[in-house]
Amino acid sequence: MFLCEETMTTAKKKVLILCTGNSCRSQMAEGVLRHYGSSQYEVFSAGTKPSSVNPIAIQVMKEIGVDISWHRSKHVDEFKGQTFDYVVTVCDNAKESCPFFPGDTKRLHWEFPDPPHDREITESVIQEFQKVRDMIHAKFKSAAEKGFE
């Protein structure tokens, strides 16, 4: 019996990363996991109250070679009824208001601090974004390399 190569490969795991605004933390996490784990994971992000992708998040991700400039903020309802292997919340608000997803979904909560969004852009604000980016980068790069288990 011969099996074609396609049936011998393992299907990608589906991951949804949730935050409130889907403007910064979840966008950065999606970018990192796509960058390092695109062969193993199909990655999406969304928010419970989406806004727009924060330009500082785009800037600090570009500094590490991850392009999220094409991302858009999405409402979690866009994914209603879909199945995911993992749903990862990156803020408490999203954890509390995360909807039910069908199937054998593993829910994880990896909280990261929210960088300042509505202040004047200064070097210290950029540094706060970089700190959060580095935390997200470490956690999601590790997940790409070692798995979520």
Image (cartoon, rainbow, N blue to C red):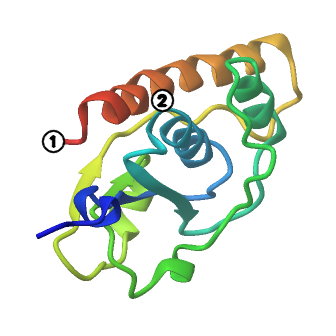
Work out whether residue 10 or residue 7 is closer to the camera in this orientation and state it: 7
Q: Which residue lies furthest to the left in this view?
A: 1
Coordinates of residue 128 in the picture (x, y in percent): 65, 19
Residue depicted at x 29% and y 79% = 100
Q: Residues within 10 Å of mark 1 (few under 14, many from 20)?
A: few
Left/right placement of residue 4 relative to residue 118 reads left
Which marked residue is nearer to the observer: mark 1 or mark 2?
A: 1
Q: What label sits on residue 60 in the rendered view? A: none
Q: Name the residue under label 1.
A: 149
Coordinates of residue 28 in the picture (x, y in percent): 60, 39
Q: Can residue 18 be seen in this view?
A: no
Left/right placement of residue 123 relative to residue 94 reads right
Identify whether 41 is placed above or below 58.
below
Coordinates of residue 29 in the picture (x, y in percent): 52, 40
Identify whether 78 is placed above or below 115.
below
Q: How many discs appear?
A: 2
Query: Circles 1 and 2: CB distance less than 8 Å?
Result: no
Q: Mark 2 points at which residue?
A: 136
Query: Where, quadrant-wise, is the C terminus in this rendering?
Result: top left
Q: Can residue 137 be seen in this view?
A: yes
* Amino acid, disc 1: Glu
Residue depicted at x 34% and y 63% = 6
Q: How far apart are marks 1 and 2 (CA)?
A: 17 Å
* Amino acid, disc 2: Ile
The kind of secondary structure element at disc 2 is helix
